């Protein structure tokens, strides 16, 4: 009887302990690395060695053909032009699921849960991946790297635990965060948006989430922090007070700037324009719209832009156009390096493999003198049908090689000078005394009318577009 009594008592105690701690037994933050996150023995990517540069003639899929990290191009090492980064959400949380189908990817290290234990294991896989790929940076959303909680306190505690491990892994590997961000679009509370929600409680919750995400990005030595307006937009203007929502968004950004300064975070704040998806109209439509928003609200000096190529094409622009718009406004901060499919009208987030597009991108980046402290973040995912672990490496390798070819081609074009000369010649009529007067704002309409009469019908030269295209092609 006595033995049974003790047994029942133990059973009760155990039940209480489980109820209090929750079912996923995890390692307390102070013990990270010493207890239950050591369950995955050995490597995550066995048989894959550090990816090396082998040159264009190599047939080894697990080698770089064009990206040679230490090689100098136009006075800067390739790795410093790019500052490549792996996007945790695609590479480690992408499952291949789509609107019509279940997940297709079952990475061997996944146990099918969203537990803290799994989050830590995944983080270790992330660091092995970036080490082997030879990339120095990674990007994350708060909710990609750690499970959400029943309460904000619980979510923050989960995040702290995973971030402590990430910090330790960063110190061992000398890797850093390119940018962090808060996921303000997945949870149902954000269905009307976050900073532009019609609900005050949601605005406050989003602020609390961004506050924490800024803190952990700072702790992980992040060089930037991104605001992508997940559901900041509208589905119908009939039920929307657009003016009020935009004012709220500006207030939210002001508060983020103030908090960044308060905690001594010196990273760049970036806004990532996108025209649609998930809302039918996103407020940060494109680079020009976002620049205008920043100017209107006096925030222009506090933010730069994160240009995503697939978002550029969704808004009816080329990636090159968006980069140039950002650059000439002094706002080019970072690139989310991906691409869409010309036959598909949504954000397919593919790895960019078009050498011509990469060349145009690099022309902008070189003109900008590089994009540090920003970089090239592979906001790109494997196709649903690519299901082998080595596909993760192959996708990043071709993404990096394509950008490297773009850099090499752009350098060839710049060193050759013919294209720049073609452009210079087009505007040479302005390289005159009167041209200079116009450009200095010293030519009024009376003066110009006098000149027009004096000169008669102007001669208009060819734009030489096909010649420009021929020059570009000669460098590819
Ligand atoms: C979605 C965005 C997103 C941001 C980060 O379309 O590209 O992935 O980069 O929230
Ligand atoms: Ni993006
Ligand atoms: Ni995107």
Image (cartoon, rainbow, N blue to C red):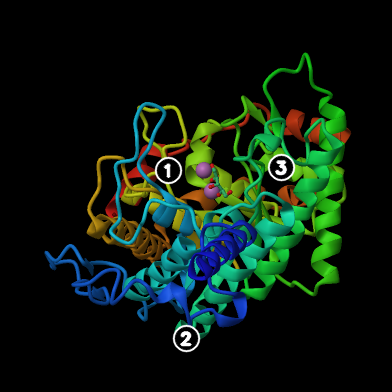
Q: Nearer the viewer, residue 13 or 449?
A: 13
Q: Nearer the viewer, residue 2 or 140?
A: 2
Which element type, helix, strand or loop, lies under badge 1? loop
Q: Residue furthest top?
A: 238
- Provide residue 249's location: percent of width, then percent of height: 81, 42
Q: Which residue is mark 2?
A: 172
* Residue 207 located left or right of residue 176: right
Q: Residue furthest bottom?
A: 172
* Residue 253 located left or right of residue 310: right
Tag nearer the camera, 1 or 2? 2
Instruction: Answer with the quarter of the image where residue 283 lies.
Output: top right
User: Which residue is depicted at the point 40% across and 55% down?
Assistant: 91
Give the numbered dot on residue 290. 3
* Residue 62 located left or right of residue 345: left
Which element type, helix, strand or loop, lies under badge 3? helix
* Label 1 crowd bin: few (<14), some (14–19), many (20+), radius 10 Å: many
């Amino acid at each position: 009887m006595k033995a049974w009594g003790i047994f029942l008592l133990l059973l009760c105690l155990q039940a209480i302990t489980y109820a209090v701690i929750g079912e996923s037994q995890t390692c307390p933050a102070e013990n990270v690395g010493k207890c239950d996150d050591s369950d995955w023995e050995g490597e995550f990517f066995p048989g894959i060695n550090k990816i090396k540069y082998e040159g264009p003639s190599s047939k080894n899929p697990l080698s770089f053909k064009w990206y040679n990290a230490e090689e100098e191009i136009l006075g800067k090492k390739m790795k410093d032009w790019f500052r490549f980064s792996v996007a945790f959400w695609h590479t480690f949380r992408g499952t291949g699921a789509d609107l019509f189908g279940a997940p297709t990817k079952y990475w061997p290290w996944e146990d099918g849960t969203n537990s803290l234990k799994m989050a830590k294991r995944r983080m270790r896989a992330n660091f092995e991946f970036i080490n082997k790929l030879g990339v120095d940076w990674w990007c994350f959303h708060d909710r990609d790297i750690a499970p959400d909680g029943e309460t904000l306190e619980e979510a923050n505690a989960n995040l702290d635990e995973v971030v402590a491990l990430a910090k330790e892994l960063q110190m061992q590997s000398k890797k850093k965060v390119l940018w962090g961000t808060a996921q303000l679009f997945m949870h149902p509370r954000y269905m009307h948006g976050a900073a532009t929600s019609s609900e005050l409680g949601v605005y406050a919750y989003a602020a609390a989430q961004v506050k924490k995400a800024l803190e952990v990005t700072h702790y992980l030595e992040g060089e930037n922090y991104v605001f992508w307006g997940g559901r900041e937009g509208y589905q119908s203007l009939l039920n929307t007070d657009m003016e009020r929502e935009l004012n709220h968004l500006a207030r939210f950004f002001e508060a983020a700037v103030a908090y960044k300064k308060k905690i001594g975070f010196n990273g760049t704040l970036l806004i990532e324009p996108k025209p649609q998806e998930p809302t039918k109209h996103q407020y940060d439509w494109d680079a020009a719209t976002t620049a205008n928003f920043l100017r209107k609200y006096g925030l222009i000096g506090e933010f730069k832009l994160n240009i995503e190529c697939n978002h550029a094409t969704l808004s009816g622009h080329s990636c090159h156009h968006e980069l140039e718009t950002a650059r000439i406004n002094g706002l080019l901060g970072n690139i989310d390096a991906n691409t869409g499919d010309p036959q598909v009208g949504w954000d397919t987030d593919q790895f960019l493999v078009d050498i011509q597009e990469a060349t145009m991108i690099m022309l902008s980046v070189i003109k900008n003198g590089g994009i540090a402290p920003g970089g090239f973040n592979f906001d790109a995912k494997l196709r649903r049908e690519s299901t082998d672990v080595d596909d993760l490496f192959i996708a990043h390798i071709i993404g990096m090689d394509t950008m490297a070819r773009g850099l090499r081609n752009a350098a060839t074009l710049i060193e050759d000078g013919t294209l720049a000369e073609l452009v210079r010649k087009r505007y040479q009529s302005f390289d005159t005394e009167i041209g200079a007067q116009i450009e200095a704002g010293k030519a009024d309409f009376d003066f110009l009318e006098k000149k027009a009469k004096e000169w008669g019908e102007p001669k208009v030269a060819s734009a030489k577009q096909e010649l420009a295209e021929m020059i570009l092609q000669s460098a590819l």
